[in-house]
Amino acid sequence: MVDMVITESQATQGVTEAFNAASVELLTKGEPAWLREGREQAWSVYEQTPMPNTRLEEWRYTDLTRLLQLASLRLPEVEVGPGSASTWPDRLRETTEQNREAAGHIVLIDGHVVHADIDPVLAEQGVILDSLHDALTLHPELVKEHLGSAVSADDGKLEALNMAMWADGIFVYVPSAVRLDLPIRVTRWISQAGAAYFSRVLIVAEAQSQVSYVDEVVSDDFDTQTLKSSAVELVAGAGAVLQYVTVQRAGSGVFVHSAQRTLAERDARIDTLNVGLGGSVHRVDLNAKLLGPGANSEMLGLYFGDGNQHFDFNTSQDHTEPNTGSDLLYKGALDGASRAVFRGIIRVLPGAQRTDAYQTNRNLLLSSGARADSLPNLEIEADDVKCSHGATVGELDTEAKFYLMSRGLDKVQAERLVVLGFLGEVLSRLPLGGVIEKVTGAIEEKLSQHG
Amino acid sequence: MTDASILRIEGLEAKVADEDLSILKGLTLDIGKGEIHAIMGPNGSGKSTLAKVLAGHPGYEATMGSVEFRGADLLDLEADERSQAGVFLAFQYPVEIPGVSIANFLRTAVQAHLPEDEELDVFDFTDILMERMEMLEMDVAFAERHVNDGFSGGEKKRNEILQMAMLKPKLAVMDETDSGLDIDALKIVASGVNKLSEEDPEMSVLLITHYQRLLDYIKPDFVHVMVDGRIVKSGGPEVALELEAGGYSEFETASAS
């Protein structure tokens, strides 16, 4: 432990006993100079950036001063977790068993890789699946070229903190024209209450390659706040196809922040699916950049809240080149006193003629205490475009419920069918092996607790 | 006929749950096992309200009278229990359930009709579904479509008949099944009802309709005229023909005075 005195003004900037220049310094040990400089620079951005407050439009509905207890968080203790699956927590083992069918796996316990494998045929073709730390040593040039290229410290306070403090991560690299048939699956388990986990994901798909990636986090419930911060950088070269899915099934008490940026070059396609089921607070900042003519992005989101869960999805679709497309669909069901915020913007720059950009957010309220706020937005500077946005907040249709009950389904079965049908539209748009079943199962589990 | 009675409605009064005004104002009707009854009446006479009250729609409330179904108090049961007991309502406006396939929906519904300890065999279910669809001259691909989502009027009504064929009710209440159908679609739907009726001669049917034309294809044993929440005339099929000639005005004047 580093002994230090934190002044009041430092504290308001988010300098704490765990997060300070000295702890950043510790992390840089043994790291290349460029990375050390990157962390130090990120730390100074963090220190100089005020903590976002609700006066900022992007944080209007998510009050960090109330929801994020930075000062009480600590860095996770370094324990190398059990390497053999037989000693893993049951829930982690069950989850990894469901995720068996894959091109490669990584399993992390508290940020440490406890299992990694990749199809040897793919490895021979140059596909890389490594922890980001190992990749720093094994593939320094590749990592240096791309790390921080999509999510940089300048993107915001939390992004800067992640860049300064990240301790674990995943690196995926797919060489030109190599196509993976099965997804890569990453399964994470976090176990230390009160810890702050900073992680990064960097996926680089070279021209004409194809890769899909599913990242899932599970944990028990925590009675003290635990932070899971991630920065996700997705880079697709010309004509490449990259699919990224994240399934958040953390326990209560977890504050999830995920900063995601997609960079799609000419004719590339990057699809994302954010599934939010667990945690207490789940905030996603997703920015899709369509950087080359013909680039495309499908942006999908699905969430199911209950209790006091708080979801906040902040998305942007940036069209800078002609003939680009993006299609966003976020759907959520909210029970109990849960709450969801969706704020999305489509930005079309003057040169991006013949852009097709769509944005839809639909919410289904299952209880009178639940709430959804939806703020779709357009900023169009080109004239030859097709763009639309729409948002709805609706309640469970009593006619639909009566219709199903008149066929013999009880109230719970009727609601289950309507909710699964409502959310199923999202999953059917990105049918990756096993994801639909897993997410459907998790939703059913939550629905069964519905009063 | 009393022994073979399946549905006995006596002095039924009902209203929209949040309102005061009664829509059914003392309706009495007795339906025997295997009988086909038709209720005809002008718009606003309360025909559809009767259908919804029988099926247990939560938006309606019975305030007086009784409904006995196979000896039990029907008004005491929730909508799902009524279905399990053998009441089926073919909706005038079938509801769209996006994202839920007909096959999945019907599997859940058929399972709900089985005793609690009995598990529906998925293969048996599929066989029965295929057989029923064939009987109703429906394309098997139909089962994978989402319930009523984007269906034409005719497809929605055929979907109702398919559900009826799968659930095999004791009493089928058909609410304006002919509305919004062209003559070809009407014939297909009517032939489905007739086939089910031949298959199970004990199934009773209550047809609710504004027009006589449905009765050209499904022949009722009894026809009732409903005006202002009551049955004002009952008789054989000839009543429908009289109505076609004279319209409802005779009854409406009588009721208003």
Image (cartoon, rainbow, N blue to C red):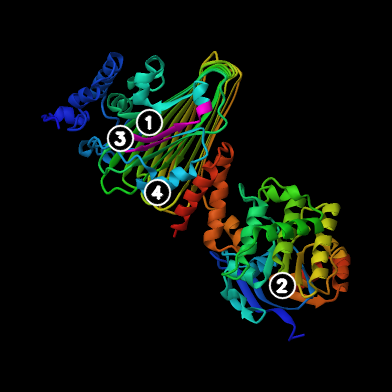
Q: Is residue A390 above or below residue B220?
A: above
Q: Which residue is mark 1?
A: A58
Which one is in front, B217 or B11? Answer: B217
Q: Is disc 1 in the same subunit as disc 2?
A: no
Structural distance between the alpha carbons of marks 1 and 4:
35 Å
Which SS class for mark 3? strand
Q: Residue at x 51, y 30 (%)?
A: A119
Q: Is disc 2 in the same subunit as disc 3?
A: no
Q: Measured from the top left, where is residue B250 in percent x and y?
A: 81, 70
Q: Are marks 1 and 4 in contact (CB under 8 Å)?
A: no
Amino acid on which disc 3 is placed: Tyr
Amino acid on which disc 2 is placed: Lys
The crowding category of the residue bearing disc 4, from other C-alpha atoms within 10 Å (few below 14, some 14 to 19, many at least 20), is few
Question: Of the residues tagged 3 and 1, which is closer to the observer?
Answer: 3
Which SS class for mark 1? helix
Q: Chain of mark 3?
A: A
Q: Are marks 1 and 2 in contact (CB under 8 Å)?
A: no
Q: Measured from the top left, where is residue A35 in percent x and y?
A: 30, 17
Question: Of the residues tagged 3 and 4, which is closer to the observer?
Answer: 4
Q: Residue at x 63, y 56 (%)?
A: B105
Structural distance between the alpha carbons of marks 4 and 2:
48 Å
Structural distance between the alpha carbons of marks 3 and 1:
23 Å
Q: Which residue is mark 4?
A: A91
Structural distance between the alpha carbons of marks 3 and 4:
19 Å
Query: For the magenta stretch, what is the residue range?
Result: A106-121
